[in-house]
Amino acid sequence: MNIPAMDGHQDVVLRAENLWKSYDHGSIAVLKGVDLKVHAGQAVALCGPSGCGKSTLLHLFAGLDESDQGRVIVNGVEVNSQSNLLRLLRHEIGFVFQLHNLIPDLTLAENCLIPTVAAGIDHRTAQARLRDLTERTGLSHRLNQRIQKLSGGERQRTALCRALMNRPGILLADEPTGSLDEQTSVSVFELLLELVASEGITLLMATHDRKLAERCDHLVEMHDGRIHELVLSQ
Amino acid sequence: MIFFKLIVTNLRRHRIRTLISIAGIAFSVAAMLTVVTILQGAIGMFSGILSSDSQMIVFERDVSDLFFSNVPSTALEAISSWPMVAHADPVVFGIVSSAGHPIITCFGVTTADARIRKATWITGDRAAFGRNSEDVVLGERAAQFLGVRIGDQVPIGHAVFHVIGVVKTANGFEDGGVFMPLGSAQSFFHKEGSSSVITIKLKSKDDASSFKKMVKANFADLVALEDDEFNRSYSQFKILKATAWAVGACGLLLGGLGVANTMIMSVFTRIREIAILRVNGFSHLQLGGMILGESAVVSLIGATSGSLVGICILFALKRVPALDGYVDPTIHPLILLVVILLALLTGIAGAFYPAVYAMRVRAVEALRFE
């Protein structure tokens, strides 16, 4: 599935070639020969029922899992080694989960700074980026709050800030609003779209929510481990 | 800073578990430090007996214990006449029992011996020592635990002696011992015509090497060692030192197992957190370093507090009257350094498996399910 490039965005940043993935020694096939190309700057939604392989595809793009067959290429480099993976996770890809996956004993600021520690980014640069992101996401007054004291929406916005701390070119989001109520879900999603647009980030997002998905540049339907159709958004 | 915060945060998260681990290391270090220092002090005191106003010691070659050494009087006469020798003092060591006291150390010495010359005489007259074969001088502690004073008769072994003085010495062994005239001791311990050792003071320290060569050339059954050499090579000292370190090592091993248990639990209960760090770019080395860092913090705090506890124990033991003179609370800096380093290494070794486990956590599996 080749998603048409938009004007000025010709580079393919995410490419899956004939991806197969199964669990339990092959008894549960999750991906069945997926091909997908995503161009730089696109916001693409992956839709489909639970178990259709959306999350698995995102995990493979982030190097968090290994395919049984096929190739995953990110920014022109095949994801197949530990050094590749570290570079990806530190500098090229940000990941947002359905559950915020923040460390509860740390503050909002400390959680956001974790990727900068991993990547060895200097303190001043990291702090400046933290201030910028938390101001844009309306969290600047909550920097020293522990995660337990944040609301669900604040936690997910914190997770979004953390994913963007190292200025990745690609954001992978796995049901980023799936655990939020409808109103919060819409506001977090709008914030997500606003941030990726302003920073020129490529977004690949798995979601159940058809309404949210339709607000992306493109919508890809998945079913039973295969990509079935590409729905161009309005 | 965040990296260190992650380390501290996890330790604070399970305070009781962390405190138990710290206590395990601390008590191990305290035990090791106390045992090693007490035995080093004991060795120091024993070697102090030998090196009293002397630089060298002559004794029977290949003997397992100085109590079994026999140095003939002919050797004493010959060595005394050598030009580099300032003085040579024969000493007979013996151990006997007395009523209610299984072990009393006896020293058979001449009137010229430094132990008699330099001791502080609490009661009695130094000039009277050696006049009568049945006279003995007691160390202050020996007089106390035997409950005798000057002029009393004291049963020692199979004989009864007359106390002609009580002396105070800085050395615990000497202070708890009995001083006999050399001839009496030779007779009492069946060492007629010989002594256990000869302590030697040379006119010049530079003559030590030539003195040893002369002993070797003239007396095939004897060996001459400088005091430091003796301390290093005497098998009894080696056994004592090895025992002390072995006991301490066992303690540390137990402490290390405590740390290992804590770190294993720590890793197993936060697999998800480790996966989060992995997704956010932490390398295997960073994850392993974090776990080892936690262990290092526990070990360092444990080693430091254990050292303080050990020092307090030693000073407390020093104040126990029965141990006065036997315990030297001075901790050698090298021993302290070795003990702390061993504690650190033990703690870090204990965290090795948990660290490897953390490094192998598969993020996607850990994050898949809540």
Image (tube, coloured by chain):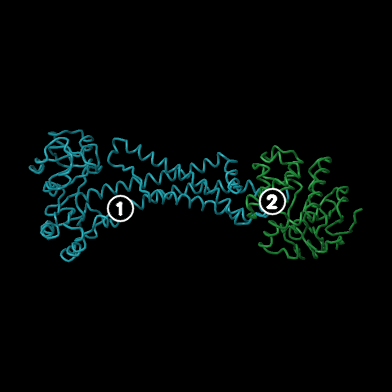
Residue B366's mark? 2
Question: Residue A11: which quarter of the image?
Answer: bottom right
Whole-percent x and y of residue B330?
33, 44
Report if residue B370 is visible in the image.
Answer: no
Q: Which chain contains the residue that carries disc 1? A: B
Out of B149 and A167, give the one closest to the viewer. A167
Q: Colour of chain B?
A: cyan
Residue at x-position 22% and y-position 60%: B61
Image quarter in which the N terminus of chain A is found: bottom right
In the image, residue B62 above or below residue B327: below
The reply to whether callout 1 and callout 2 are in contact (CB within 8 Å) is no
Out of A151 and A7, give the one closest to the viewer. A7
In the image, residue B16 above or below residue B1: above
Whole-percent x and y of residue A224?
84, 57
Residue A92's mark? none
Residues indicated by labels 1 and 2 sit on the same polypeptide chain: yes
Q: Colour of chain A?
A: green
Q: Which residue is mark 1?
A: B237
Out of A145 and B73, give the one closest to the viewer. A145
